[in-house]
Amino acid sequence: MYLGEKLIKREPFRWGIVGGGKTSQVGYKHRLGAMRDNTSFLLTAAAFDVDAERCREFGVSLGMDADRCYPDYKTMFEEEAKREDGIEVVDVATPNFLHYEVTKAALEAGLHVICEKPLFFEAEQGEEIKKLAEEKGKIVAVTYGFSGFDMLKQMRAMVTSGKLGKINMIELRYAHGFGCDPEGDVKSEGQKWRVNPAKVGKAFVLGDLSTHTYYMSQLICPDQKLKEVLCDRQAFVGSRYPLEDNAYVLMHYEDGAVGRMWCSCVNAGDMSSQHIRIVGSKASLEWNDARPDVVKYQIQGQPEQLLYRGLDYLDASAQEDERIGALHYTGLIDSWSNLYKRFAVVMDAKDRGDEETVKNVIYPDLDHGIDGIKWINACAESADKGAVWVQV
């Protein structure tokens, strides 16, 4: 059980952030996730905003030193490198089109990187960054923020131990209704760039939503290798074209398993957005983010079982992040906190040369980020060719 105690021997990582300011939809999640237990990361410097004054005002409102609230990331990296107490890790919480250049600059400055998803626009950029990270001896992690829920590790343990038999079907859904209002694209600062192809890339909801759920399926079923996808996508709010606000994806895996993904921001009225169902030859597992502490376990011919977070019958891996005990409900910030705890552990291990820990920590790493790029681009290619099968 994890009760928020200090897990790394050193002082908290001195942490900076690029983006994630006052108008950001994700900045607060990053800050609270990183500093919830106040043991792994300490927010030291920031380039919150393209508006330097707004950046300073926001940083000061958080209790930061005004002199370490910088006008841009290049200045932050340059000035922090001059300090004995300069930052050691940087968080990239910018619009997608900046992820690659900021991540590259951070690695060149000798910093570990935590980057928002989707990682970059092209897989080749990911491979270049992977080579640079290896040269610099640094970690690049990706904030698939839902993937820190404890019960996903329980599902992984049951899948990999064979309790479900052979995996035959993977059913995925991330479909909410908060994109139904076309005026929202204009009113929300965080939404404007998400529907601009120049800033978001080749997809809207396929990148913004489905990469979360796709990675979670990889976490749960690590041995399932995707072979090809067929994608049909729509822009029901026409101003979003050529990007999509709804998509259906069929998947073929190398071992013969099949899958489906429904991804949408125009699923009007739905508040239970993410669903994952793993169907094996013997049994199935089902989870949704409306009840993240519960997994349905359905063995063919037997009564359905409900598995609850925090109880002793769970696999040890599902207990590693436990803070509050059974019957006390967790939420999205707990998931983010679990991720940041793992990021700190793996970064500390990397700095100490402990490659065994680096290899064994379960977290969304650079390879998973590259897989996300390939997923988005294959889906977009399939849809643009008229919904045909495309190799991944």
Image (cartoon, helix red, strand yellow):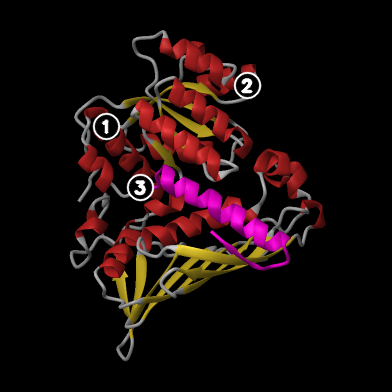
Does 2 appear above or below 353? below
Q: Residue at x 25, y 48 (%)?
A: 360
Assign a secondary structure to mark 1. helix
Residue 16 numbered mark, or none: none
Q: Residues within 10 Å of mark 1 (few under 14, many from 20)?
A: many
Quarter residue 52 falls in: top right
Mark 2–mark 1 Cα distance, whole angstroms, equals 33 Å
Looking at the image, residue 307 sits to the left or right of residue 56; the answer is left
Does 241 appear above or below 125? below
Looking at the image, residue 20 sits to the left or right of residue 255; the answer is right
248 part of magenta stretch: no
Residue 363 numbered mark, or none: 3
Closer-to-camera residue (253/322):
253
> Which numbered disc flags the more N-terminal residue, 2 or 1?
2
Question: CB under 8 Å between callouts 3 and 1?
Answer: no
Does 268 appear above or below 353? below
Chain part drawn in magenta: 364-392
Residue 54 numbered mark, or none: 2
Q: Amino acid at mark 2?
A: Arg
Identify the residue position indicated by label 1 in the image: 348
Count of numbered badges drawn on the protein = 3
Looking at the image, residue 236 sits to the left or right of residue 146; the answer is right
Q: Is residue 144 visible?
A: no
Q: Amino acid at mark 3?
A: Tyr
